[in-house]
Amino acid sequence: MSNGSRYVERFGQLEASRSNWEQHWQDIAEFVLPNRDFTRTYAKGEERRQRIYNNTPGESLERLVGGINSLLTNQSQKWFDFGVHQYVTTNEDDRWLSRARDVVLDLMSDPTLNLYATLDECYESLAGFGTGVVFADTKNGLRFRSVPLSGAYIDEDYNGVVNTVYRKFKYTLRQAIAAFGLDSFPQELQDRVNAADDNSKMMGDEHQFIHCVGPREDYDNDSLLATKKPYYSIVVHCDTKHIVSESGFDRNPYMVPRWRKGSGEKYGRSPGMILLQDIRYCNALSKAALSAAMKEADPPVQMPDSGFLKPARLGPGGLNVYRSSSMGRIEPIPTGARSDRAYALIQEIETRIRSGFYNDMFQMPMQDRMTATEVIQRQQEMRGLFAPTLNRLYSELLDPLVYEVFDLAVRADLLPEAPEGIRARGLKIHYTSPLARAQRASELHSFMEWFGPVGAVAEADPSVMDNVHPDRLARRLAKSVSLPEEITRTDDELNTLRQTREQMQQAQEEMMAAQSVASAAKDGAQAISAMRG
């Protein structure tokens, strides 16, 4: 294959542009996520937590990751629905959209897709370092994979959308041959492998590669060739700068969500970055408090420099013999260490760290005398603070992810034929998770605020309720609370039910009228009989 020098050169530019971020990420990793490497390299299996004296930052981040998983992409819930752009759907359309959603959710739960494990790793990177990277590998079906931020280098287009990702990774020669084939490597390397009597050691040697993905300028939408698709996919062997794989994608297979993003910056900013100074303080104070507590429990001692018959025994219960004429004695040195003061300050900083990692959003408020409505409102206010990050997660991670799985369902022919009204229009995604519903809660609250005073007026004049269409209101509120489509009645079912009810009421009225006529006739007959004597 052709030479990959220009891709290696571009990788060098991307690598240089993010150098300032790496030390920042390494500082966070040291105290919060010690299993990540950026500027420091650990040996495999090496202990990484030597500098950590307080686990609150790591535990708080884990609670945030668990909360996002539970309230945003919970595997046991239907956390999104499909809709259609600029189109009022019929009951048939709604049934098809509901079926499509169920098929996609069922595929997402398939362990071979590795989706939910990937999301967990991505959320961890997002909360810690501000940027996550997910790769949708479509080489053999579809499998998602979380890419370590340490090996991912990105660039944006003029709209601020990530359109270029270069990923540096290592394969053993055995893995590389299985992935790309021996014939794809330079002839020199092929000859060495073929000439070796025992190449087992050579096969275990690690080689570095760069996967380069970006927009292709000369793509052809009508072509079936992968090398003509809108996004190029090039794998380069770093040592030889030789291209070992060349392909393409219809859209960027890398999803790069950012927690928050500063103007003019490509990489995201995270709660871990904002809290880094507090995390440092908390760790340093915890180390000092531990030292003070150790001094209180086992204080240093002072003793005279002469008069002892044997070396001093400073362990617990140690017996020391000295000359009785000597006035010297062993006694603790008063240091004035007060670990309780340090612990009070530590608790204050720990509270700030938990709050900075949004832990308050995932637990019930503990204030006394709060009504259920106040508790719900308080939680919704806290989740409202999460809204900017949530919107970015939708556009940069979850939207492309859902569409990838939907395309898999289409390719596997798992969906019934779409109704005519849907075929010519693009799908859109409505998120129905608890966090998404919290964003839409204002609509429900607006109705309740309207209904309160209007309901009071309706007691005097019921006609005021004619301003609202009951069926339309019911459907709108059903969407606001994500009422499952399968438990709602279609228009035909609703019309049939109302016609049946009307017929039953009419029959009952006719029966009552007949009974009234019969009763009147009976009373009249009795009256005539009485008059005749």
Image (cartoon, rainbow, N blue to C red):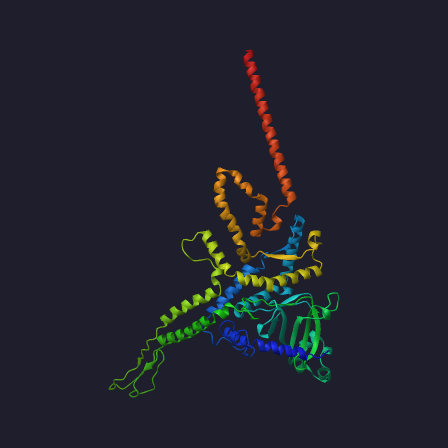
The answer to which image quadrant residue 339 occupies is bottom left
* Residue 526 horizontal/vertical position (percent): 56, 17
Residue 410 image offset from top left, x and y in percent: 70, 59
Q: Position of residue 412 (x, y in %)?
A: 71, 60
The image quadrant where one finds the N terminus is: bottom right
Q: Residue at x 38, y 71 (%)?
A: 342
Left or right relative to 157: residue 48: left
The answer to which image quadrant residue 250 occupies is bottom right
Quadrant of the image for the C terminus? top right
Residue 521 as seen in the image, left or right of residue 226: left
Q: Is residue 242 visible?
A: yes
| Residue at image point 61% right, 48% down | 487
Front residue of this view, candidates 437 and 12: 12
Which residue is nearer to you in this view: 218 or 340?
218
Which residue occupies the extreme top position in the image? 533
Number of numbered discs on residues:
0
Q: In which quadrant of the rendered view does residue 108 lie? A: bottom right
The reply to whether residue 319 is visible in this rendering is no
- Tell me if residue 422 comes above or below residue 267 in the rendering: above
| Front-lying residue, 31 or 219 | 219
Q: Is 294 on the left-hand or right-hand side of 394? A: left
Q: Is residue 344 above or below residue 463?
A: below
Outermost residue on the left side: it is: 325
Percent x, y for residue 155? 61, 72
Check the image and report above or below for 188 versus 391: below
